[in-house]
Amino acid sequence: GQLLVDATACPQDISFPTDLNLLDNAREKSEELIDVLYKASLHKTKPRTYRKVARKLYLKTAQKKVKSKKEIRRVLRQQLGFVSRNIKNILKLLTAYETIPLNAHQYKYLLVIQTLYDQQAKMYKEKSHTVEDRIVSIHQLHVRPIVRGKTNARVEFGAKINVSLMNGFAFLEDLSWDAFNEGTRLIKTVEQYK
């Protein structure tokens, strides 16, 4: 029988991620982790997160239909600052514990937030929008951008697949998310924050 092979993408239904939205998500998640980690019996004072100020600054720009590049860069710099401060405070809070008190889900978010921050800071510094293994969703870490070159959708988000069709049967040969390997991203040492 005839063998047909095709490579395609399976789009994942996620909102189109902007750098600003991703940093806002990471900032809110880092605030949650600070709330979880802070214990009055272990820590002197609760770190300030400036969450209301940060959210207000984000919304002021995010809700505008037209945003200048200069304005976007200014807000990105502000949000990078808030996320960076939160990460440092999380690591400081962790030094008071004998073992890391986060469950697997929370710990994953901590690693994702750190990696996302590193990626966003790199892109901001280089005035770029691309980075290796780019995170486009902090909640669905496996989702990756796929450049399609379509008129109406130049970039989609999802898995790449190879499908072969033979004698009326479809065979899934390969499925790749190009997923971020959590094992390769170790938590930054807390020793330096003691």
Image (cartoon, helix red, strand yellow):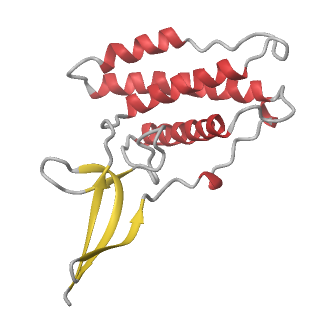
Q: Is residue 85 visible?
A: no
Identify the residue at horizontal 58%, vertical 36% (top origin). 109
Q: Is residue 88 above or below residue 188?
A: above
* Residue furthest out toward the left: 151
Location of the C terminus (image quadrant) = top right
Q: Is residue 151 above or below residue 99?
A: below
Q: Nearer the viewer, residue 82 or 178?
A: 178
Q: Is residue 154 visible?
A: yes
Identify the residue at horizontal 72%, vertical 12% (top origin). 46
Identify the residue at horizontal 21%, vertical 78% (top origin). 168
Q: Position of residue 11 (x, y in %)?
A: 29, 51
Q: Position of residue 171 (x, y in %)?
A: 32, 74
Q: Is residue 45 left or right of residue 86?
A: right
Q: Position of residue 140 (x, y in %)?
A: 46, 43
Location of the N terminus (image quadrant) = bottom left
Q: Is residue 14 left or right of residue 98?
A: left
Q: Position of residue 130 (x, y in %)?
A: 38, 48
